[in-house]
Amino acid sequence: MLWASAVSDWRDRMSCPDFMSDSQDKIDNKDFSLLIAEDNAADRLLLVTILKRLGYRVVEAKNGQEAIELFQRNQPNIVLLDVLMPVVDGFETARQIRLVAGDDFIPIIFLSSLQEAKILEQYVQAGGDDFITKPYNRVMLAAKITSFRRMQSMHLELQRQRDEISRNNQHLLQEQEVAKAVYDKVTRAGCLGVSNIRYIMSPLSIFNGDVLLAAIRPRGTLLVLLGDFTGHGLAAALGAMPLSQSFYAMAEKGYSAPDILRELNDVLGDALPVGYFCCACLVELNLAEQTLWGWNGGLPDCYIFHRQDAGITPLRSTGLPLGILRTNKFKSEGQYYDISYGDKVYLWSDGIIEASNARGEMFGEGRLRAVFDGHSGDEALMGEVMRCVSEFVGGGAQSDDLSFVEVEMIESTQFGQQNVPQLARAKQGRVDWSLEYRLGFESLKNSNPLPLLHQLLLEVPALRTYSGDIYTILAELYSNALEHGVLRLSSVKKATGEGFIEYYQQRERRLKDLTSGHISIAMRYQGDDNSGELSVRMTDSGHEYIDSQDIIEASNPYSGRGLGILKQLCYRVSYTKGDVEIGYRWQE
């Protein structure tokens, strides 16, 4: 009787106008399927009939376990799920279907005659998206299904966009990896691996807006540059490419530190857009003479830490950053400092000073100076600074690139010839040539002939192996001719650290005020692929070349080394006032 009554009731409802289908309902419905899980046969038949008349494909299940199995096999678009079912109830069935569906959006509509608020809350917690109460209303059911179809379309579009973004992001990451490899190869082409340089660089993103470069000039001095570009990430790192290439090329050719700075300023001025620049600090360590030349343009004050008394000499910013001013206004003049073996130079970017904690307080120069002042002089100062910064920041997020560099003054014998860049050789055969080169006082004031002469000699493939020796010879000859001959300076002034600094300050003043004088250079080379001889004669207009055995054998580290070095490297050295000639031989 109950079954007959249910069927009669179903027939009455099906005859109502609400259940009459129209062609519009069936548009595009045939490819859309629904799973009905209902243990009551009459209710299940009613739902199946309604949905089929709307044009949908329907899969039927009599209990929760059967519903889970049918869902796995048929992958329907929407699930209509009764709450009270045998074997597995509707709540557990919904959870299992959600696990199977994964990231796919499969709407679950609960079927129930219960309408209490607590029951409705359970529907949502179990993974349901909506519910419909008995007796079923065709219009309401059709509207809910149509609404969920729109939501599914949006979800599919979001998934498509997500997958496209993921693919694009993966492609971008691959491109970034390639770009990063090229970036690292270019910016780390120098000698950052030498024993007396230690550094920590923590970029805010994949690309670092801070750049650290190190190179050994042919004369054997060590150049170290720390730069901090405007901004962060790729935009900031792009400027590091031309900066690095120019730096390494000019250092290899033997250009002086001020010349390198002027070139870097011009390169960045041309390459960077308006508003972008590079704060930088460049130091040059002369390991043989125990001196340091430094220039700081826009970086925080860096320190020279003296091991003997734990004293600190600041490297203050005295110039503008690279890339702002044009050549005629840019100031590349640095300062000489007295430094001893074991002393260390510390450079850092503003990311150290501006590191902030959760309260928005910056680490600041005061806290950094306190770390240096409280240092006992052991080997862990760099680690101590970074530990203090890390403890201060705590859980605060990193807001800038962090860079901290330590460069130690060590004896040149510890540095090792393996660190001096070597140029490749090639076979050439027998060569025999000579040249003469004369510089007037205007050229002496405004140019440095050594890189040009050095590169000219390196055009002889056999001489490339001896690049360092050749540059040292040219540099010693030229320095003596210019300083002692044309400028009439005495090396006696360089007997102390203070005198050394005064000597080079006086050199700059006299060179700037020079109104007469010249230097003539004559070179001749004869050789083949197995041996050769280079003769260099340098004559100056001052006729004051200092010939003193006391100077040659002087024990102080600041002067008296020039002629001694020439005698060590050359088989022949002859000198008179205003005229020096050397002979340099090499043989396989």
Image (tube, helix red, strand yellow):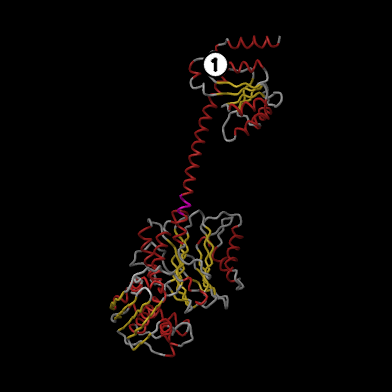
- Magenta stretch in the rendered image: 175-179
Q: Position of residue 27 (x, y in %)?
A: 48, 20
How many numbered markers are drawn?
1
Q: Nearer the viewer, residue 357 or 382?
A: 382
The quarter holding residue 119 reads top right
Three-letter amino acid code of the residue under disc 1: Arg
Residue 78 lies, with reference to residue 451, above or below; the image says above
Q: Which residue is mark 1?
A: 53
Q: The N terminus appears in which quarter of the rendering?
A: top right
Is 362 left, or right, of 326 in this rendering? right
Q: SS for tag 1?
A: helix
Is 63 left, or right, of 487 in this rendering? right
Residue 543 lies in the magenta stretch: no
Which residue is at a point 66% across and 27% down the rendered structure image?
A: 120
Is 511 left, or right, of 72 in this rendering? left
Q: Position of residue 491 (x, y in %)?
A: 41, 85
Neighbor class of circle 1 (other Cα within 10 Å; few <14, some 14-19, many 20+) is some
Q: Residue pushed farthest bottom?
A: 549
Q: Nearer the viewer, residue 154 or 132?
A: 154
Q: Nearer the viewer, residue 262 or 33?
A: 33
Q: Position of residue 499 (x, y in %)?
A: 45, 83
Q: The C terminus appears in which quarter of the rendering?
A: bottom left
Q: Position of residue 128 (x, y in %)?
A: 62, 29
The quarter holding residue 363 reads bottom right
